[in-house]
Image (cartoon, rainbow, N blue to C red):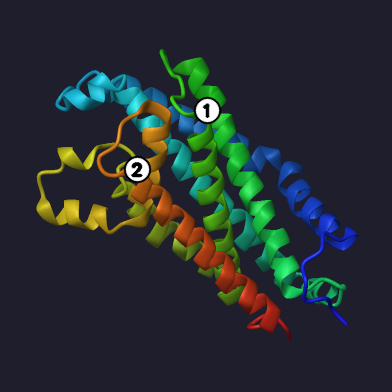
Amino acid sequence: MKNNHFVISTAFVVLVKREVFRFLSLYKQTIIPGVISSALYIIVFGHALGQRIRENPDIEAAGGYMLFIIPGLIMMSVINHAYQNSSSSLMQAKFLKFLDDILITPLSGFEISLAYIIGGAVRGILNAFSIILLSYIIAPNFSIDNYFMTFLYIFVVSWAFSAFGLLVGIYAKTWDHIGVFTNFVFLPLTMLGGVFWSIDMLNNILLKNISLINPIYWMINGLRDSIIGYNDTFSILSLVISCSFAIIFTVIASYFFSKGYKIKS
């Protein structure tokens, strides 16, 4: 009989290690591409466009356009990699028919879902730290104002989208279903989330309102405040929204795993 109380067991540790080592063994696909793409964004947008974007004095006071876009790029990488790890890992387990082997272990549904979420969160965090190290190298005057809050935002958002990726992996029947969220949900929300501009620079009231109801905007805004000290809105609200999504997605994913919803054949 499975224990409904969470205890750190050997089986749980093994499953977490499996999830972490799975993406580490494929670092050329899971870590390096994100660093390279972020470097290109920083160089092309930061250097090329940054010389022409002088409209917002607050951005200039915060260190310039190059430093302004770095927190957004970090958050964009965190969201994408955390989501991709948990969703693709669960989809792979379903596709290769070894998910049933995991389900018959003496682990509860909560423990199994937690292991998948931790794996995705670790990948998101490692990608974030890689971009931060890159920023110290290629971005002049880059520094972090608040290390604790920076790590907290990265951890919470990594956890939230890893849990969301697990939810998508539970529902997905094909690999295309996972890609739909990346291309048609995350990409538009990220572009409207203030990665490359402040909402103060938007003259269109409709686009401003869309940004304000976009949860990714608040996550980027909170991380930007913790790194360079610039924010468009209340940073404490950004943290509340980020934590709320992390808790909600974790609870739902754990519940579905515990009930075997769309998992047990």
- Residue 51 image position (x, y, % from top left): 24, 18
Do tag 2 and tag 1 residues touch (Cβ < 8 Å)?
no
Residue 71 in sight here: yes
Q: Which residue is mark 1?
A: 132
Residue 176 in sight here: no
Left or right placement of residue 186 versus residue 90 in this view? left
- Disc 1 residue type? Ile
Spatial distance from mark 2 to mark 1, Cα to Cα? 20 Å
Judge the density around disc 1: few (<14), some (14-19), many (≥20) Cα neighbours within 10 Å. many
Q: Quadrant of residue 43?
A: top left
Q: Residue at x 38, y 52 (%)?
A: 216
- Residue 29 image position (x, y, % from top left): 64, 42
- Looking at the rendered structure, the secondary structure element under dot 2 is helix
Which label sits in the foreground, 2 or 1? Answer: 2
Furthest-top residue in view? 140
Q: Which residue is mark 2?
A: 235
Earlier sequence position, callout 2 versus callout 1: 1
- Looking at the rendered structure, the secondary structure element under dot 1 is helix
Q: Give above or below for 126 relative to 47.
A: below
Left or right placement of residue 96 versus residue 28 in this view? right
Q: Residue at x 36, y 34 (%)?
A: 225
- Residue 103 image position (x, y, % from top left): 80, 75
Left or right placement of residue 14 versus residue 36 in this view? right
Q: Residue at x 88, y 82 (%)?
A: 1
- Disc 2 residue type? Ser
Q: Nearer the viewer, residue 124 or 234?
A: 234
Q: Nearer the viewer, residue 121 or 92?
A: 121
